[in-house]
Image: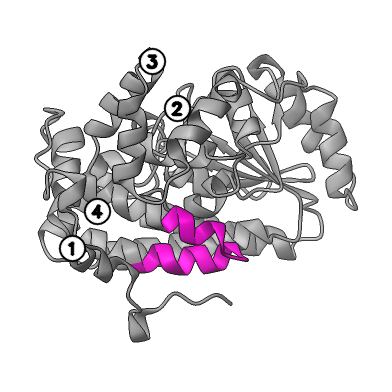
Amino acid sequence: MTAGADAEGDLIVQREGSAGIIRLNRPKAINAMTLEMSEGIDAALDRFESDPSVAVVLLEGAGERGLCAGGDIRGLYESSCAGGDLGKRFWRQEYVMNARIAKYPKPYVAFMDGLVMGGGVGLSGHARHRVVTERTKLAMPEVGLGFFPDVGGTWLLSRSPGEIGTYFGLTGQTMNGPDAIYARFADAVVPSAKLPVLREALTKVSAGATSADIKALIEGLATGETAGPVAAMQANIDGWFAHDRMEDIVAALQRDGSELAQATLKTLGEKSPRGMVVTLRLLRLARASSSLEECLVREYRAALEVFRSDDFREGVRAAVIDKDRNPKWSPAAIEDVTPAMQAPYFAGIGADELTFN
């Protein structure tokens, strides 16, 4: 432990040289985020922002498996089943923090090594400096849980080239490091073997280090890769996913006899019809939005409705609780997701609206 270290718990916050370190420390759960961890990160950001000896903030995950596998889905499931309010408290804290990370005044570096999913994207995808490796597996798989890509995911996905973000948001498919750069979720690929070198360099930057200085440090160790396998699929993806209705996307895939189209169709067939319809609408609204905050407000409204929904509980049951991978979605088909079903996800919520400092 180094100067200013807190006791080792689910979150380790410490200063090493001129770097403020935030380490997610639940390696057995691939550092899945709890409400308490989120609050601890916020407190760490306060502390490092006001400490003149901290020039840069570094986010990393404990263990070999990944930065963060997402939020504490089991806890949210149990609260939803019991009619609790964890969703409201958890997502409010998380989304406000996501917006804060995007505007953090000091250079904020995220090591996106290994698995980075859901809430892990919220902690890293809005960072000033986003470092992926050859081991990165980044995904927003929420539609498979009757949910949608949140934590500002609709903002990030809607700013990917063409329909790449629509594809990743609706299928939940995994990006490798270069894919993540191409999709604008990351900035540089650094070999995992060189992360300790970069980490050491970050602890030794001068007090007045700028984002340009940090970028130069990262680029000095980067591979220069900017496009992965998904880039080669761009033309096909743009053709299939350029529609504003799920029925039209499915029809476009059905018309295409290629192996990739049929595999994509099969993937969509496993997702929550309601989750896909809501996700597509959120992505199209995000594309017309002018700020991350605007998207987060919309996501919060929709998340509270998800928390009340049978589809969310069923999706988590099938994937996490019983692990039978056989959810019974309601409704079972996209054409049965009516405007009346969609409306509550997009309605204002009065006094509970998300606000930012």
Residue 82 x %, y %: 10, 61
Tell which circle, 1 or 3, labels the residue nearer the N-terminal end: 3
Element assignment for label 4: helix
Q: Is residue 8 visible?
A: no
The relative height of residue 91 versus residue 8 in the rendered view (above or below) is below
Residue 26 x %, y %: 40, 37
Residue 13 x %, y %: 58, 48
The residue positioned 59% from the left and 40% from the top of the image is 162
In-front residue for pair 259/23: 259
The residue positioned 26% from the left and 69% from the top of the image is 343
In-front residue for pair 133/182: 182
Residue bearing mark 1: 308
CA distance separating discs 4 and 2: 23 Å
Q: Which mark is residue 76?
A: 4
Tell which circle, 2 or 3, labels the residue nearer the N-terminal end: 2
Mark 3 surroundings: few (<14), some (14-19) or many (≥20) residues within 10 A: few
Residue bearing mark 2: 174
Tell me, yes or no, whether the highlighted magenta stretch contains residue 291. Answer: yes
Pointers 1 and 4 in contact (CB under 8 A)?
Answer: no
Task: Indicate the quadrant where residue 180 lies.
Answer: top right
Residue bearing mark 3: 258
